């Protein structure tokens, strides 16, 4: 490919980690690291090789860019004016976003739908850009019917991300403290008191958490057909840090349903990464970018997509293991 992947926020945590992963997978893939601080972006580009650095202006529809020779636009920051999306649509480029969240997704979906023939839009504002969803979907393969899906994510309180990620969490929490679940087939909002729930980590420790309104809930509900789906999120001291090790992340997946013979089945799985959420978030973005570029499978058609509609869960799990996650 002679055109570069434009990574908005490419010098931040999520952007730079994603760029490093894409470089690992595709050593000759051109990358453009876009940020507000050109010196910082240039340092990231220099470390990557086969990369350039630019500054962007998200208040402008053209992003303030003179060059338009790009293959995709990856927004690893809050595209509040949707100019990253508009730029992608204006140039017929695939677009991926991770910061809209369930509560901010409306304008992005409408913009994508109004120009649905312009380019594929991957809405990946899920936990870790869809990693929890993909891990869960890989786990349900032995089920003939899924009745209940419950996912609990335990994030260490020293691992809440960079400035962009923290700003996203603050923005979402300022909008509502309610939770979203699927209960008996109905998507239901929970009052703050009802949203409270513990998240059990791999060593059995329970961290106080709550149901949160994330895209993982409708993605899991609609992909599995399960009438009962809940995703809880807890922030606290993870088991690894209690042992004096670096902060980890723990994704607990509880499933209930029936097997091919109609027998009741219950399963619990954990996905743990010893280095916390950063490598898994970067992996989720990189998997989406890889798919949008047609580097793993055919290029997706124009329109709105989600991670589970494009990425094979078994392939995602293989990449998780390569990235250092343990699955059990």
Image (tube, rainbow, N blue to C red):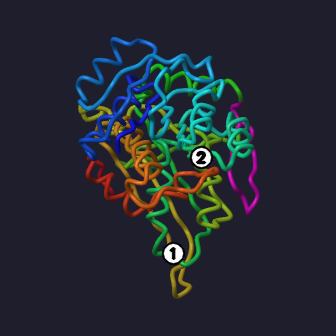
Q: Position of residue 103 (x, y in %)?
A: 69, 36
Residue 1 sits above or below residue 238 on the image: below
| Residue at screen point 63% across, 24% down | 80
Q: Nearer the viewer, residue 46 or 223?
A: 46
Q: CA distance from mark 1 to mark 2?
A: 35 Å
Q: Which residue is identified by label 1?
A: 143
Write the start and end of the magenta stretch as one range: 176-192
Q: Position of residue 165 (x, y in %)?
A: 49, 26
Query: Which tag, 1 or 2, sits closer to the chain's start?
Result: 2
Q: Which residue is identified by label 2?
A: 119
In this view, the residue farthest toward the bottom is: 261
Residue 190 sits above or below residue 48 on the image: below
Check if residue 245 falls in the magenta segment.
no
Q: Quadrant of residue 110?
A: top right
| Residue at screen point 44% across, 65% down | 139
How packed mark 1 is, by other alpha carbons closer than 10 Å (few <14, some 14-19, many 20 or more), is: many
- Dot 1: element: loop
Q: Nearer the viewer, residue 302 or 246?
A: 302
Q: Quadrant of residue 59?
A: top right
| Residue at screen point 47% across, 19% down | 163
């Amino acid at each position: 490919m002679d055109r570069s992947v434009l990574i908005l926020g490419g010098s931040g945590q999520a952007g730079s980690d994603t760029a490093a992963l894409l470089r690992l997978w595709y050593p000759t893939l051109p990358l453009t690291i876009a940020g507000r601080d050109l010196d910082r972006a240039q340092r990231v580009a220099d470390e990557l090789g086969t990369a350039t650095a630019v500054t962007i202006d998200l208040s402008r529809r053209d992003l303030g860019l003179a060059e338009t020779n790009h293959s995709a636009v990856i927004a690893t920051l809050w595209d509040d004016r949707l100019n990253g999306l508009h730029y992608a649509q204006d140039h017929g480029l695939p677009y991926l976003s991770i910061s809209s969240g369930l509560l901010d997704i409306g304008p992005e979906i409408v913009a994508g739908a109004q120009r649905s023939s312009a380019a594929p839009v991957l809405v990946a504002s899920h936990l870790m850009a869809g990693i929890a969803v993909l891990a869960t979907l890989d786990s349900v393969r032995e089920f003939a019917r899924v009745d209940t899906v419950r996912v609990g994510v335990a994030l260490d309180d020293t691992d809440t991300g960079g400035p962009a990620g923290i700003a996203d969490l603050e923005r979402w929490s300022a909008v509502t403290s309610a939770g979203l679940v699927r209960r008996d087939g109905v998507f239901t909002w929970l009052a703050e008191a009802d949203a409270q729930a513990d998240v059990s980590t791999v060593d059995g420790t329970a961290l106080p958490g709550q149901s949160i309104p994330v895209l993982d809930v409708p993605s899991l509900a609609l992909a599995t057909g399960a009438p009962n789906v809940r995703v809880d999120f807890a922030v606290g001291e993870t088991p690894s840090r209690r042992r004096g090790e670096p902060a980890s992340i723990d994704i607990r997946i509880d499933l209930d349903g029936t097997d091919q013979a109609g027998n009741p089945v219950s399963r619990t799985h954990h996905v743990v990464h010893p280095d916390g959420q950063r490598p898994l978030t970067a992996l989720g973005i990189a998997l989406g970018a890889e798919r949008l570029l047609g580097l793993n499978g055919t290029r997706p058609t124009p329109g709105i997509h989600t991670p589970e509609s494009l990425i094979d869960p078994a392939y995602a799990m293989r990449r998780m293991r390569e990235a250092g996650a343990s699955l059990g």
